[in-house]
Image: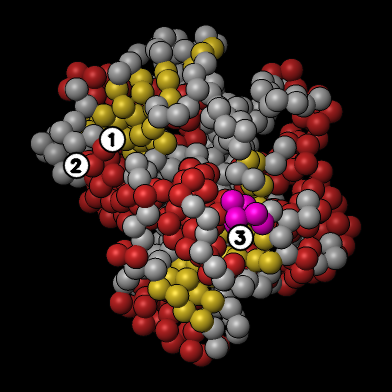
Amino acid sequence: MAWSSSSSPRSSGSGRSRAWRRRSDGSRARSSAPRASSRTRGSSRRRLLRWSRPSARSFERTRACSRRSADAWTITSKRGVRPAAQTAYEAVCENLDRRRRVALGFERIEALLALLDRPHRSLRVAQVVGTNGKGTTATSLAAALEAAGWPSGAYLSPHVLSYTERVMIGGVPVSQREFASAMGKVMEVADASGVPATQFEILTAGALGIFRDRGLEFAVLEAGLGARHDATTAAPAEVVVLTNVGLDHAEYLGGTVEEVAIEKLASVRPGSTLVLGTDDERVVRLARRACERVGAGLVRVEDGCLEDPATAGLPPHLARNARLGMRAAEVLLGRPLLGEEQRRAAALWGRLPARFEEFEVDGVPVVVDGGHNPEGIAATLAAVRARYAGKPLVVVFGALREKDLVGMFGAVEGEAASVVLTRPGGSGGRAAEPEDLVREYAPKDESGGGAVVVRDPGGALEVAVEEAAGKGGAVLVTGSLYTAAGVLGVLRGGGDRD
């Protein structure tokens, strides 16, 4: 496959003075730093949010890797980070950005792992594959193992605001210093040995190295693309979790559910166990065949088997992912997990950025979700309907050109009282231009009205909040993790995405 590079998304924001606060258990803090705006509807200042969960096992929600200057960094970790570490982290982020491309196959990752003394061989590995819900399932699986007394890490992709989100230990991203040290070493080894490793391969090898060096027992790996040729499959898994199968990345995985399922089931190996989280009979049939062919076990986790008071209060699709992860942990350990308190902790650790993340802006509920295919957006909309029943919904939508735009608009139409189209920040030539979306797809709200275009995600959020406030409604930001990153950069304090 031809080498190509793409810069990472950057969030942008704009707006006027507002009191932003996170809903549920987030702590609050405010900063009055203004942001510049390029949007077309209004211009003023917005007050920005910085917050972190109070738990010791929480995310530190901060700007992680500004590209302006070392002096512009804002770090709020408890121990602090010295300028030298910040500079090293910035350099590693930029180096990773330059290596971003899609190139499937095992030749490079296997060579890289061999050069690093095969860190995966010191770990017991679980792999999570599927179209939607992989991240929350993987995080809940790792958290459940941790709650049961087994030190565990989760390797996730993509990140939303910080590269460090990709490597989680104990429910918390690793530090910038540890991340920079590990990934810098991998890139040095790759370059010195002439291995043209991709960004994802470097991150995969680096995460496995961190887990080994920390002395962890388990590594939970979220597949990046499919499974057959994905770098995470180079580390043989005892348990493979298949969350569900939908149509995404058709150019690589195929254009039917059956084709996509076959690609994702290819990582099941002799002696492993497949934990199946979907009841789609097409997928179930193929899963049985795949397991029989290689001599693997099959555990079906159907909807009726997923009731668990530990996940009460979570949006339905996130609760299901958490329960699936906990069930996979039980399969991996060969015994039931601990009591409800530990299960509840595992479920809460599964909350990731831009996965049905809830805020309140001037009394208006705002949900930020990075759903980027019809199935993901439909699940989010169902959760919004259940949580905010009776409230008109204003949807901020920005997506990438290669996605199923017709299917995503089909999910939104009929649900949205108003639609605000925006441009995913920092996605380069992949972004679907909102003006083109209006011209080609003519998206409508539930009353048949046309969409409003506000190119800047921060400005689009402001317009949506004003619209929702006038209707007593709620706001949903969706369509892409790039769009979510742009809005979260405003809500959390204006940080750039790494």
User: Residue 455 bears which disc, if any?
Assistant: none
Q: In the shown orientation, is residue 221 left or right of residue 260?
A: right
In the image, residue 68 lies at what x, y percent?
Answer: 68, 23
Q: As drawn, is 111 to the left or to the right of 2?
A: right
- Quarter of the image for residue 152 reads bottom right
Q: Which residue is mark 1?
A: 395
Contact flag, marks 1 and 2 (Cβ < 8 Å): yes
| The residue positioned farthest toward the right in the image shown | 192
Q: Is residue 102 visible?
A: no
For badge 3, the amino acid type reads: Leu
The correct choice, above or below, for 318 with respect to 173 in the image is below
> In which quadrant of the rendered image does the N terminus lie?
bottom right
Q: Gap between marks 2 and 3, in whole Å? A: 35 Å
The residue that label 3 is drawn on is 221
The reply to whether the C-beta atoms of the residues labelled 2 and 3 are less than 8 Å apart is no
Q: For mark 1, give the secondary structure.
A: strand
Q: Identify the residue at horizontal 42%, vertical 36% (top origin).
A: 357
Q: Badge 2: few (under 14), some or many (20 or more) residues near its Cα, within 10 Å?
A: many
